Amino acid sequence: MKPSFRYTKSVPAEWVDYNGHMNDAEYSRAFSLATDAFIEHVGLDEAARNQWNYTIFTLETHTCYLQEVKEKAAFDITAKILDYDSKRMHLFFTMKNEAGELVATFEEMLMGIDQTEGRGAPFPETVAATIREIYQAQDNEEYIKQAGRTIGIRRK
């Protein structure tokens, strides 16, 4: 079984804004770095991408900011595959602080791309097998409050 995914980092000074906490754009950077690490985790490291002339594009993202994260604070990002098909992955990342409190979430849709054709294409078989293995090993019944949210003002 593929070990679970975890990405850990601390907030560098250059990620802190005039409010004294991590800037909203830097949450996107942190989740993007975690996405890159997850892509490597499923078997698409630089060598594999070059070998297969295959890469991953981001189609859509949604971030929820739940708590402030200050300079030098450590955070941990984990990933869950909400769904997948032959060439797409619907992922959900959670960012937690050192106390284990949820501070942000990031939902995204990724698509595998054949770089020769310049269009969507099925994952290489070993990558597809790893995605399947991770999905089958995780808790797929878990309710995730932030997943699938839309932006809007709730009217009473």
Image (cartoon, rainbow, N blue to C red):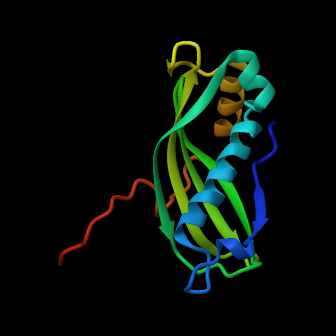
Q: Report x, y in % for residue 49.
A: 71, 25
Q: Report x, y in % for residue 11.
A: 72, 72
Furthest residue in direction top, as rendered = 117
* Quarter occupied by residue 129: top right
Name the residue: 53% across, 25% down: 87
For the C terminus, the image quarter is bottom left
Q: Nearer the viewer, residue 131 or 13?
A: 13
Name the residue: 55% across, 62% down: 105
Furthest residue in direction bottom, as rendered = 19
**Against 27, is 56 above or below?**
above
Q: Report x, y in % for residue 14.
A: 69, 72
Furthest residue in direction left, as rendered = 156
Q: Give the left or right position of residue 104, taking residue 154 as reference.
A: right
Q: Report x, y in % for residue 96.
A: 67, 70
Name the residue: 56% across, 55% down: 142
* Quarter occupied by residue 17: bottom right
Q: Give the left or right position of residue 81, taking residue 97 as reference.
A: left
For the N terminus, the image quarter is top right
Q: Nearer the viewer, residue 102 or 12?
A: 12
Query: How many numbered markers are drawn?
Result: 0
**Against 19, is 74 above or below?**
above
